[in-house]
Image (cartoon, rainbow, N blue to C red):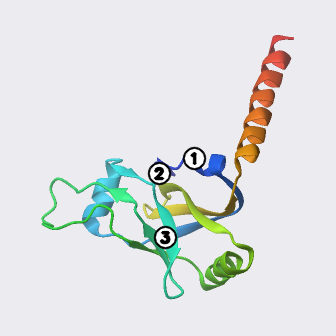
Amino acid sequence: MKIIATNKRANYDYNITLKLDAGIVLTGSEVKSLRHNSSSIKESYVDEKGSELWLCNCFIKKYSSSSEKDMNPTRQRKLLVHKKELNKILGSMKKEGFSIIPISMYFNDAGLVKLNIGLGKGKKKFDKRESQKTKDWNKNKQRLLKNN
């Protein structure tokens, strides 16, 4: 498994309850560009249109040797998810107000590009402070145990 891009702020900004893997519909030149690690999912989000999931605002740089003249690097890309998982995601989005957050993009063992997505609710400012305090305390606790 080779990680292409990660969204480091996903765990900081959201309480993620469920993680799933989804395939992405890409062109050949986009896959070649991803092999050179020229992408970003920091500002991206997942949107639902017509009972399908779409990855929006994901930047994939134009492949230098490609013959495509008008490639849009931030075009919308369709996500491939099993029907049961899709129904579970859409139901929790509509009923409980969850958001779908892209966490990381990677090549699996078969060489296919996958997107790790998570269902989560946004954190408030005090939640972020609390999680930072616990993270710092755990670091200090490990240092104290290591020194003793």
Tell me which numbered mark, 2 or 1, is placed earlier along the sequence: 1
**Image coords of residue 140 (percent x, y):** 79, 22
Q: Is residue 101 left or right of residue 72?
A: right
**Image coords of residue 95 (percent x, y):** 73, 80
Q: Which residue is mark 3?
A: 23
- The residue at the far bottom in this view is 50
Q: Is residue 3 visible?
A: no
**Relative to 19, residue 89 above or below:** below
The reply to whether dot 1 and dot 3 touch (C-beta < 8 Å) is no
Q: Which residue is mark 2?
A: 42
Q: CA distance from mark 1 to mark 3?
A: 22 Å
Q: Could you classify mark 1 by the number of other residues whose Cα lies within 10 Å: few (under 14), some (14-19), or many (20 or more)?
A: few
Q: Amino acid at mark 2?
A: Lys
Q: Is residue 118 visible?
A: yes
Q: Residue at x 40, y 60 (%)?
A: 58
Q: Amino acid at mark 1?
A: Arg
From the viewer's side, name the closer residue of 69 and 113: 69
The image's mark for residue 9 is 1
In this rendering, the label closer to the viewer, 3 or 2? 2
Q: Quadrant of residue 138?
A: top right
Query: For the residue labelled by badge 2, is the local secondary structure a helix, a strand or a loop?
Result: loop
**Relative to 50, residue 119 above or below:** above
The reply to whether dot 2 and dot 1 touch (C-beta < 8 Å) is yes
Q: Amino acid at mark 3?
A: Gly
In this rendering, the label closer to the viewer, 1 or 3? 1
From the viewer's side, name the closer residue of 85 and 42: 42
Q: Residue at x 71, y 76 (%)?
A: 92
**Relative to 123, residue 74 above or below:** below
Tell me which numbered mark, 1 or 3, is placed earlier along the sequence: 1
